[in-house]
Amino acid sequence: MTATKEPSGFSPDITSTPIAPKQRRGGFALIDLYRSAIGKKWVMAITGILLMGFVFAHMVGNLKMYFGAEDFNAYGEFLRRLAYPLLPKTGALWLLRMGLIAAFALHIHAAYSLTMLNRKARPVAYQSKRDYIAVNWANRSMRWTGVIVLLFLFWHLADLTWGVDAVNGEFVYGEVYDNVVFSLERWPVALIYIVGNLALGVHLYHGSWSLFQTLGTMSAKFNPRHNPLRRGFAIGFAVIVAGANISFPIAVLTGVVG
């Protein structure tokens, strides 16, 4: 049997191995998407829509206060009995609360992560002073109004949901109307609600506008000519929600409600 000649430069002692394909980062596709700036912007937009729906529905429900104690307390009982007896009393309400907590957590984390990404991507300030001032004002207002709204939310829960004695010493479970009146007839507390809702209004305006920008620029049908309409919605939504909420402490202080 004739031996075959090895090609020049070939070493039979060396085993050739295939090149391993580039490994993809671990994790689920949604988690990988969330790691990107685009994914974080989408999360902020979607959770923003959910939270906007909540604050609007909450404001509309609170308008029942102007119809008197009976109607307002009935509204509170309606919320506690959602989906009852299919679910235990307050069961559906707690499911909604958990969904809102998740939306809040994702919204806050996405906002913080985007801020960190922007700082790393742009360590040098804008060259145009006008652009620098405009962009920084928008970013800072969203950041600070977001912090104020979050602190106000904890106060609001301690005051009218948890009934913390240090915040609302006259809290009585189920007596929604009396709890609100007792809380808001104290002018320092009324001031907290007014400032908190002013911050909410500013945050809603910038948030609504940013939401449309995020979803619009990612759409093939985005048309900058619709920007005045989007801005009008952002202004109108913020004014309606914040204005109605601010009217409640004013109405209690002036004796319109009480």
Image (cartoon, helix red, strand yellow):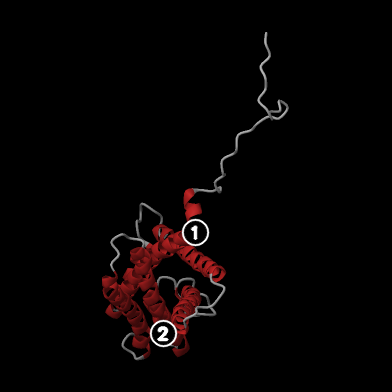
The kind of residue tagged 1 is Ser
* For residue 131, above or below residue 38: below
Image quadrant assignment for residue 77: bottom left
| Callout 2 secondary element | helix
The kind of residue tagged 2 is Ile
In percent of the image, x 45 and y 78: which residue is there? 135
Disc 2 crowd rating (10 Å Cα; few below 14, some 14-19, many 20+) is many
What is the x, y in percent for residue 171?
46, 76
What is the x, y in percent for residue 242?
36, 80
Query: Closer to the camera, 57 or 1?
Result: 1
| Callout 1 secondary element | loop
* For residue 20, above or below residue 188: above
Quadrant in which the C terminus appears: bottom left
Q: Is residue 33 visible?
A: yes
Q: Residue furthest front?
A: 8
Q: Is residue 182 visible?
A: no
What is the x, y in percent for residue 143?
49, 76
What is the x, y in percent for residue 181?
39, 82
Q: Which residue is mark 2?
A: 194
Query: Closer to the camera, 94 or 116?
Result: 116
Q: Which residue is mark 1?
A: 36
